[in-house]
Image (cartoon, helix red, strand yellow):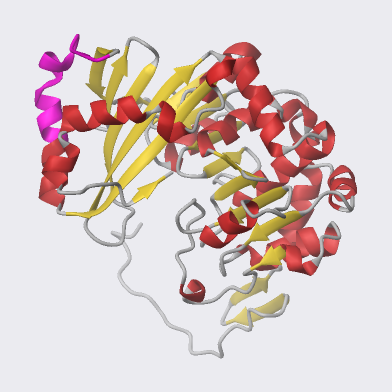
Amino acid sequence: RSRSISAYRVVSAEDVAIGESGRLKLGAMQVEVVDSVTDYVDLMQTLFDFAAIKSLLNNASFRMCFDAMHAVTGPYARAIFQQRLGVPAQSIVNADPLEDFGGGHPDPNLTYAHELVQTMYAADAPDFGAACDGDGDRNMILGRHFFVSPSDSVAILAANAHLVPGYHKGLAGVARSMPTSQALDRVALKLGIPCYETPTGWKFFGNLLDAGLITLCGEESFGTGSDHVREKDGLWAVLFWLNILAVRRQSVAEIARDHWRTYGRNFYLRHDYEGLDTRVAESVLQDLRADFTRLEGRRLGVYKIKSCDDFRYTDPVDQSEALGQGIRLIFENDARIVLRLSGTGTEGATLRVYLEQFEPDPTRHGLEATQALQALTEVADDIAGIRRRLARDAPTVIT
């Protein structure tokens, strides 16, 4: 229709008062101002057992901390946790949305959410911690002295969905972005439901959600969601975790370790190299693509490359194709290295290197991810020449 528009008209009027709910006229158009916080809280109450969560949060032995990072979720967190669930006001920090996010970076990861991390690793740490990003669609989950990787988080939500009212009838299917760890695949296999591997980008999940092919989905970049909205939802994930904690009455760490005992642990790290010269970053991937034939079958220590490709995806709903979605190096011992460029940085290019190693042995589940993946990290540097070509001694961010 944009090609047929020949003119447009402008109405001169007072600014719409968006701070108050109600209806008003703007020319011939009716404008309705709604309270999105109230609507959202009402929706959450249809999905989660607020009575059980309130019982958990009002127990003197349980404490939580939610960091809104001076972004949009502050008013929502106050309405849900403080007003509906009775959490003390001091348990919600940085809840006033500010244009400059209080001078911080509203990204819920171990680097930028350092205030929450310090709180959760202190001697008197709360039992549960969470943070959401600038627009509220991503989340980070922490227990006392314990970080839950986003890949593990979506897998744990799927494995425990039957405990939550909105999902107790089961899941139609699940999906993860290609760089996200395969922990979710193992849950789907046990549940007997499909698990889709998509390119990075929520629009691919959107098609699957619209078609009813999946109920839950998630990505390693701290985004998780379901069919309650057509987008990832940070506060929804926080409430999902609280509902599981309320039913199981275990700590965050106990739930994660129990999950690893059942499904095995997918050790996982993402190394972000930010602010790179775009041409240099692109050349790293171009050279790897040119070397696929030489790389297959190559052995580097205990790692032997089984296959390598540039991920392509055919959408099962509309049959559209997405090409060149990231380089995958698959090893014979259930390890993966994925490399892709991201355009979400604020300056220059960002090269993301994803490292994954499956570990079935419970006696090794207690290792730190950096320790468990040290050898694989060296393999990635050897294959791609990351330090030499990028002139970086270490990643900008590790998650």
Q: Does residue 224 show up?
A: yes
Provide residue 230's location: percent of width, then percent of height: 56, 44
Residue 134 is left or right of residue 34, and the answer is: left
Using the rendered image of the protein, determine whether residue 192 is visible from the camera's viewpoint.
Answer: no
Which residue corresponds to the image point at 67% horizontal and 72% vertical from the top-left?
33
- When the figure is inspected, residue 34 is found, relative to residue 126, above or below; the finding is below
* 343 relative position to 291: left or right: right
Residue at (24% x, 18% y) in the render: 308
Q: Residue 275 lies in what quarter of the image?
A: bottom left
Residue found farthest to the front: 123
Is residue 261 or residue 19 the one in the foreground?
Answer: 261
Asked if residue 392 is positioned above or below residue 368 in the image, the reply reads below
Image quarter hosting the C terminus:
top left
Q: Any magenta on residue 289?
A: yes
Q: Position of residue 345 (x, y in %)?
A: 31, 56
Residue 390 locus on image (x, y percent): 15, 46
Q: How many marks?
A: 0
In the figure, residue 168 lies in which quadrant? Answer: top right
- Identity of the residue drawn at 35% across and 34% down: 354
Span of residues in magenta: 285-301
As drawn, 346 above or below 267: below
Position of 354 compared to 211: left or right?
left
Frontmost residue, 2 versus 326: 326
Q: Quadrant of the N terminus?
A: bottom left
The answer to if 126 sits in the magenta stretch is no
Q: Quadrant of residue 303?
A: top left
140 above or below 27? above
Q: Position of residue 304 (x, y in %)?
A: 26, 11
